[in-house]
Amino acid sequence: MRAAGVMEAAISAFRHNYEALCREETGLIPEEAIRPAEGLPVFEPGSEGFAPELLSQTVVIKLNGGLGTSMGLQKVKSVLEVRPGVAFLDLIVRQIVALRQASGSKVRLLLMNSFSTSEDTLGYLARHADGGFAEASEVELMQNQVPKIDEATLAPAEWPANPSLEWCPPGHGDLYPALVGSGWLDRLLADGVKYAFVSNSDNLGAVLEPGLLKHFAESGAPFLMEVTRRTPADRKGGHLAVRRDNQRLLLREVAQCPDADLDAFQDIDKHQYFNTNSIWLRLDLLKQRLEEGGGVLPLPMIRNRKTVDPRDKSSTSVIQLEVAMGAAIECFEGAQAIEVSRARFAPVKSTADLFALRSDAYSVGDDGRVELVEFRKGVPPVVKLDDSYKLVDSLGALGVPSLAACEEVAIEGLVSFSEGVILRGKVAFSAPAGGVKSVASGTYSDGEFAL
């Protein structure tokens, strides 16, 4: 790792997890060790007021290390367009500019890039150079890389055919060693920055909310996690719980759940709260906690079993050691969680998500906020696309119908929506194989339409 230029803070964090692996720790959190988190405070937008002086002490950190490969994109996902000529990164910049204008202070932005996304991101941000967003020294926090572990020998995996596949990202829990090892933590503190709001760059609902910042600052808590109520779609996502032995909040991911406890893990009435992966940090208290731990936050290890070449299932079996950013909630005495509106959790994980986002079910403001139109009351349209639309390029031919009043839309086969198509209620369209079928302008309400 040193030979590859990995920072010492990341090496220490990896050593912590590798030694746990060698001790044959599973990283599993059984149901009997926890109880459900209940009765969390609920944040109501506008309830806390606006405190511009706090914004001058805040940095917005966006986790931007992911490629859009699952959607056929060979670039960083945040260059996907939400509206013609407007990508995720443009909206993130708009949000920061709006906060700067509202507060009169230079609210900071950091993008936690990976080796795969750095060049694309900085290249795209050249269009925002006038605002100071294109300089790596001002906006970039680099994610680390760690070795994949040969499952049979526990040695670093070797793959001469493509040595880059011997490495993997350590999960978004790498935020903490990256902040330390890069020097950014000390640099921010020296500049009077006390608070950090961290979220995924593909979660366009996660905007720095001044009222939440005020709530966090007044709480005195070292760490605050935004959670929302789980739905059937969230059964596999990490949930919040309380550890019975020390009564601390914890995050349990599905990879940390014993097979025997999967039914309980997926019980959304029992474990009600879903981690949105948006967190708030007190940077001075983070530094103090790291110093107490010898420079390492003792985050729970997550074992991910894969093959060294993910496209070759016959290649060497490996273990990828990962840590979750939200798992740090257990590392801080007095850490808290708060329930927020589902509207603050709008990630783009598939072309179906992107199809909905590009429609009039969402509004895109000059301040970079992406919000469901008001009468939807925070409920997004359900979009079901068949495998014909797995790749981003396929959406261009599909078109963008009105989904403002659509509850659910399902599409099978190659379809092209004409200008002026309005979908209402629950609708389904099916087209036979062998060509693209056009949907003529008009309103389509509650029904199945064979083309």
Image (cartoon, grey):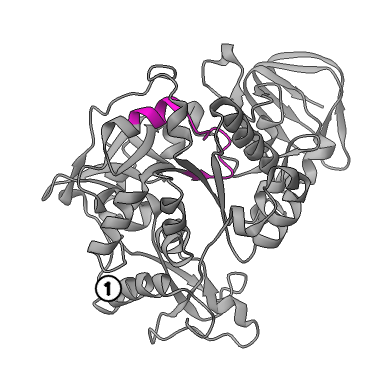
Disc 1 residue type (three-letter): Ala
Does residue 362 appear in the picture of this structure? yes
**Nearer to me, 353 or 191:** 191
Residue at the location (42% across, 70% down)?
A: 10
Q: Residue furthest left?
A: 245
Tell whether 441 sits left or right of 142: right
The tally of labels here is 1
Residue at the location (70% across, 42% down)?
A: 131
Res 27 quadrant in image = bottom left
In the image, which residues are magenta? Answer: 198-215
x and y percentages locating residue 151 in the rendered image: 41, 80
- Please check the rendered image and state whether residue 212 is part of the magenta-colored stretch, yes or no: yes
Res 135 quadrant in image = bottom right
- Please check the rendered image and state whether residue 77 is part of the magenta-colored stretch, yes or no: no
Mark 1 neighbour class, 10 Å CA radius: few under 14, some 14 to 19, many 20 or more: some
Q: Is residue 227 above or below residue 125?
A: above
Residue corresponding to mark 1: 20
For the C terminus, give its image quadrant.
top right
- What secondary structure is marked by label 1? helix
Does residue 338 appear in the picture of this structure? no
Tell whether 13 sits left or right of 118: left
Res 67 quadrant in image = bottom right
x and y percentages locating residue 26 in the rendered image: 27, 67
Tell whether 266 sits left or right of 4: left
Residue at the location (45% across, 52% down)?
A: 188
**Nearer to me, 14 or 285:** 285
x and y percentages locating residue 170 in the rendered image: 46, 65
Q: Is residue 434 above or below residue 428?
A: below
Residue at the location (10% across, 50% down)?
A: 245
x and y percentages locating residue 431 in the rendered image: 80, 33
